[in-house]
Amino acid sequence: MGQTATVTTVIVHGAGSTGAAARALLGALPATVCVEDRSGEIEHIVDRLHETLLAHRDCTEVVGISLGAHAVARWAATCTRALPRIRLVLPAWLGPPGTASTATLLAAHSIAAEGIPATLLRLRSDGAHPDIAALLDRAWIEYADDELARCLHAASIGMGPTAEQLAAIRGPVTVLGWMGDAFHPASVAWDWASHLRWPTIALGARPEIRLLRQALATTRGARA
């Protein structure tokens, strides 16, 4: 029998994204496996993450992006074993859906009414940063209109981790964000970090993939 390859990093992508788009955002990371989900339902994603980590106990790092960060935080809050390194990238809201969830819900409504190409065009005309538009373009092309609209709608009504859940995480956590993104306000990254026991936080000055990757690289192995 062949040996199972070691998995160093487990990645949980955001709503309306894919594992491939998540890898493109994060850049080169050690041996990875992605928790793929197109439902947008936070409870389902937490369950999928739990199952994935049971199957990959050699994992040393878990990275959650957007809704994936919500799922990772909620999983980590109840984890009873030694935690791998936790990296929460672009959190969107704390606890009940907040201001950023409105942007997600509006995107769902726009896709249902106009389709994905028209919605992407409108986001660009509304001044979306080119890197954000490029990420959405890469991820959304993998979805049908109705599938993506359902996913984003489900994500927009899902509970994020509460302050109490963040405080319950028994290990160092890195929070990464960037400025100028209505879907992932920088204030939420600061808010999450304020409730963690051992936080490290890094914020990019604008929503550029290059800056996010730099933050990932410079905080790898950082002490809280």
Image: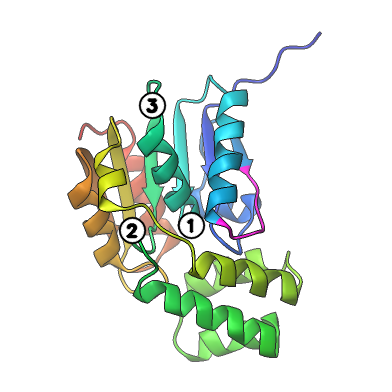
Q: Quadrant of the C terminus?
A: top left
Q: Residues within 10 Å of mark 1 (few under 14, many from 20)?
A: many
Q: In the image, 186: left or right of 146?
A: left
**Residue at 73 percent of width and 67 percent of height:** 143
Question: Mark 1 or 2 closer to N-term?
Answer: 1
Question: Mark 3 or 2 closer to N-term?
Answer: 3
Q: Which residues are magenta?
A: 35-41
Q: Tag 2, which secondary structure?
A: strand
Give how far apart the Cα atoms at labels 1 and 3 are.
Answer: 20 Å
Residue 10 is situated, as x and y percent measured from the top left of the image, at: 54, 36
Task: Give the colouring mode of the picture.
Answer: rainbow
Question: Mark 1 or 3 closer to N-term?
Answer: 1
Amino acid type, label 3 = Leu
Q: Quadrant of residue 92?
A: bottom left
Numbered disc in front, either 3 or 2: 3
Give the dominant element type of the magenta stretch: helix, strand or loop: loop
* 125 is higher (above) or lower (below) than 147: below
Picture disc at residue 177: 2
Picture disc at residue 83: 3
Q: In the image, 99: left or right of 104?
A: left
Magenta stretch: includes residue 84: no
**Residue at 45 percent of width and 43 percent of height:** 72
Amino acid type, label 2 = Gly
Magenta stretch: includes residue 39: yes
Q: Tag 1, which secondary structure?
A: helix
**Residue at 38 percent of width and 47 percent of height:** 88
Provide the residue designation for mark 1. Answer: 67
